Amino acid sequence: MVIFSASAMLFYSIALVLVTSKLFHNDGPNRRLVAGIASVAVILHAAALSQAIFTGDGQNFSLTNVISSVNWIIAFAFTALMFRIKVIVLVPVVYACSVLSVAVLWLLPPKYIVHFEANPEVLVHIILSLIAYSALMIAALYAIQLAFIQKKLKQKQFMLSPAIPPLMTVEKQLYHLVIVGVILLSLSLATGFIFLDDMFADGKGHKAVLSIMAWFVYVTMLWQEYRVGCKVRTAVIYTLTGGTLLTLAYFGARIVKELIIN
């Protein structure tokens, strides 16, 4: 795993430098080159994750492995859509987080062994949860950029750049991501209610409650946008609030249990 992890960090770093060095250049970064380098990083990251998760004792779904998996999904999405995405300024953030997630995967390897071969339906629930969370975290990144662009526009400090798309473009993509995320989150919650007998058991109930609260936040946001329209600031608050609730649901207790207590 050390070779895969170190190599993934190296290629992510190269992609990061390639994007950052020409981020505000008139022509922007060479997307073909960045996508090629990042693809290698994503493949190596996947190999490192495979070795970290699939062990002889079972599947190691430790906190660091789950966080790195989320980062892998996000990095994979941005790399696969490199030629279509307009929000290129987010790419350095994604690759920088990927470098850190691979480093944590390598340096902090706690164990949380599960056996999905006995309960494949639980694996379906977890995969849906991870993809939903990843989509909504990407939406959170878009929301932060949306707030930044609006602030610069109000202050009349906004500089035209190929790295910074129009406000309306980012806002439209934000809602598309939230819609996709809500659909996946709905499926995740539905499979949880169907397949998990201990969804509200002691020590686990907060996950379900916080996830349901996040779902209501996102649905309220979409309903308000459909009925009367959301101001940019309101949409940002909704998105970041939902993302915070999901993060607390997915990782709050495990951070305390695996990284602090242990």
Image (cartoon, grey):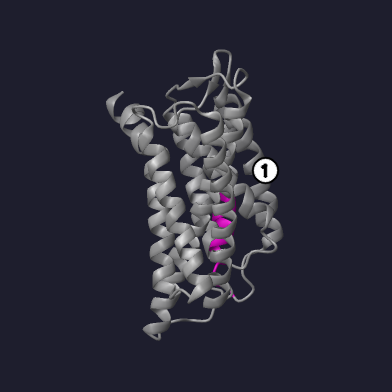
- For image coordinates 52% across by 20% down, the residue present is 114
Q: Residues within 10 Å of mark 1 (few under 14, many from 20)?
A: some
Q: Is residue 202 above or below residue 128?
A: above
Which is more toward the observer, 91 or 115?
115
Which is more toward the observer, 51 or 146?
146
Verify whether residue 23 appears in magenta. Answer: yes
Left or right: residue 255 compared with residue 167: left
Q: Quadrant of residue 252?
A: top left
Which is more toward the observer, 103 or 116?
116
> Could you tell me which quadrant the C terminus lies in?
top left
Looking at the rendered structure, the kind of residue marked 1 is Val
- For image coordinates 54% across by 56% down, the residue present is 17
Q: Is residue 140 above or below residue 202?
A: below
Residue 47 place in picture, x, y as percent: 63, 31
Left or right: residue 201 compared with residue 228: left
Q: Is residue 36 above or below residue 104?
A: below
Q: Main secondary structure of the magenta part?
A: helix
Residue 25 place in picture, x, y as percent: 58, 73
**In the displayed image of the protein, which residue is found farthest to the top?**
57
Left or right: residue 89 compared with residue 217: right
- For image coordinates 34% across by 34% down, the residue present is 253
Verify whether residue 119 appears in magenta. Answer: no
Assign a secondary structure to mark 1: helix
Residue 60 place in picture, x, y as percent: 51, 23
Residue beneath disc 1: 40
Left or right: residue 45 compared with residue 155: right
Residue 32 place in picture, x, y as percent: 71, 59
Which is more toward the observer, 69 or 178?
178
**Magenta residues, start to end:** 13-25
